[in-house]
Image (spheres, grey):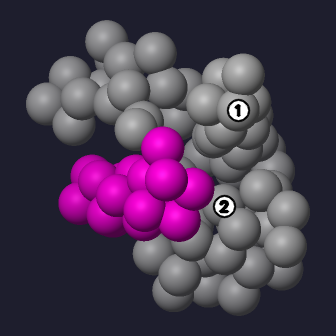
Amino acid sequence: MSIKDQVIAIIAEQAMLEPTDIQMESTLEDIGIDSLGLVESIFAIEERFDISVPFNANDPGASTFDISSVATIIAAVTQLKEEQSA
């Protein structure tokens, strides 16, 4: 399963949706994920990919981890995995 598919599966699970219901341009808010769901999604991503996500739940705007859309989350996870492999 690709990084994209795995991230979408995690987000879909948090939103209680099917992965096919998740659109790349959707924001987490669009699909019904609140701040607690966001934190749980970040933890699930960290666990699934064995990475440390630079995200501060107390100040999401100050984070270098872009959560503005599903696509940006996938891109950020992909970048973290690439940096880990280097």
Magenta residues span 30-51
Looking at the image, residue 67 lies above or below residue 39: above
**In the displayed structure image, the side of residue 63 where residue 70 appears, left or right:** right
Q: Mark 2 points at which residue?
A: 7
**In the displayed structure image, the side of residue 63 where residue 13 appears, left or right:** right
Q: Alpha-carbon neighbours of circle 1 within 10 Å: few (<14), some, or many (≥20)? A: few
At horizontal 48% and vertical 44% (from top left) the residue drawn is: 51
At horizontal 35% and vertical 58% (from top left) the residue drawn is: 43
Q: Mark 1 points at which residue?
A: 85
35 within the magenta span: yes
Task: Give the alpha-carbon distance from disc 2 to disc 1, as whole Å.
Answer: 18 Å
Residue at the extreme left: 58
Residue 47, quarter of the rendered image? bottom left
Q: Is the magenta stretch mostly helix, strand or loop?
A: helix
Q: Residue 39 carries which label?
A: none
Query: In the structure shown, which secondary structural element does the residue marked by tag 1 occupy?
Result: helix
Residue at the extreme front: 86
- Tell which of 2 and 67 is nearer to you: 2
Q: Alpha-carbon neighbours of circle 2 within 10 Å: few (<14), some, or many (≥20)? A: many
Looking at the image, residue 51 lies above or below residue 72: below
**In the displayed structure image, the side of residue 5 where residue 13 appears, left or right:** left
Looking at the image, residue 1 lies above or below residue 83: below
Query: Residue type at mark 2?
Result: Val
Query: In the structure shown, which secondary structural element does the residue marked by tag 2 occupy?
Result: helix
